[in-house]
Amino acid sequence: MTGIWAIVPIKDTHFSKSRLAPVMSDRMRRQLALIMFEDVLTALLHAPGLEGIMVPTPDVEITRIGRRYGVEIMAEPTPTDYNRVARQAACRIAEQGGDAALILPADIPLLTSGEVQAVLSAASAMQVAILAARDGIGTNGLLLRGPDVMVPHFGIHSLHRHRQLACSHGLSHTVMDFPGFGFDIDTSLDIYDLWMLASPTETGRFVEQAIRRGEIKVEKPCQVM
Ligand SMILES: Nc1nc2c(ncn2[C@@H]2O[C@H](COP(=O)(O)OP(=O)(O)OP(=O)(O)O)[C@@H](O)[C@H]2O)c(=O)[nH]1
Ligand SMILES: O=C(O)[C@H](O)COP(=O)(O)O
């Protein structure tokens, strides 16, 4: 194993996207998680410069889809946690001789292969690249060169934490903003914003159709005066 590997952890899709429970049924949330995963895989598979894709997951359907796309599945017999399972995958890639790992979630369906390529080339001289979430405080991607130079700490205020960690380890690092990387689908507000964008992705189409059929309840967010 050499080169740069993407790591896309995804949990059991029966329990995915729980924050969307107020506006979507369990069945729809599961479908949304599966479709977003496929959009992310499609972007990664078309990005020149990536050697491979590793997907840590306990989910049977994700395993089936991943294998169809030819990605490497890292089985996760019991649910772990995003950071822990991402770290395990990164260590596995490091042990097998991989040069770098790009850790990203499976819920950023507007990701493009151009963005991935841009990160890989712009950050080619950096040990760490932190891909900002659009809220400006989260992290939606972490490029680590080598894969185990730093332990990922995704979660609330993770952008600041990742910066601090890189500094304290003396690692060269950069923070980058891209619309696709930045846009993770967590809440009904994200669904509304995605709908407004009329994105030509599979996820964009799924959301548009589901809203039209009344299967997702969206409300225009209140304007703060
Ligand atoms: N393999 C694996 N992936 C995880 C785990 N926990 C979270 N993830 C993935 O990490 C990414 C970011 O997680 P979240 O944004 O919290 O997504 P989510 O857990 O589906 O959404 P909520 O239930 O609303 O928190 C998604 O791709 C998740 O599927 C886990 O225990 N194992
Ligand atoms: O900010 C982060 O580290 C990630 O976006 C995870 O946060 P989320 O669970 O809110 O997506």
Image (cartoon, helix red, strand yellow):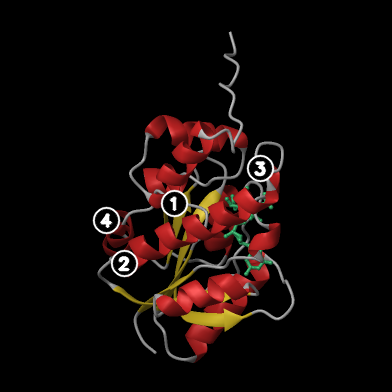
Query: Real-space Cα distance between discs 4 and 3?
Result: 29 Å
Spot the residue most to the top. 225
**Disc 1: which residue:** 109
Mark 4 / mark 2, whichever is N-terminal: 4
Disc 4 marks which amino acid? Gly
Mark 2 / mark 1, whichever is N-terminal: 1
Query: Real-space Cα distance between discs 2 and 1?
Result: 27 Å
Query: Real-space Cα distance between discs 3 and 1?
Result: 16 Å
Q: Position of residue 23 (x, y in %)?
A: 66, 36
Mark 3 / mark 1, whichever is N-terminal: 3
Mark 4 / mark 1, whichever is N-terminal: 1
**Disc 4: which residue:** 114
Does the rendering let one see residue 105?
no
Residue 195 sits in which quadrant?
top left
Which structural element holds mark 1? loop
Whether ligand 2 has any atom under 8 Å from the Cβ at mark 4 is answered as no
Check if mark 4's residue and mark 3's residue have beta carbons within 8 Å. Answer: no
**Disc 2: which residue:** 125
Q: Which mark is residue 20?
A: 3
Q: Position of residue 27 (x, y in %)?
A: 65, 53
Q: Residue at x 54, y 45 (%)?
A: 185
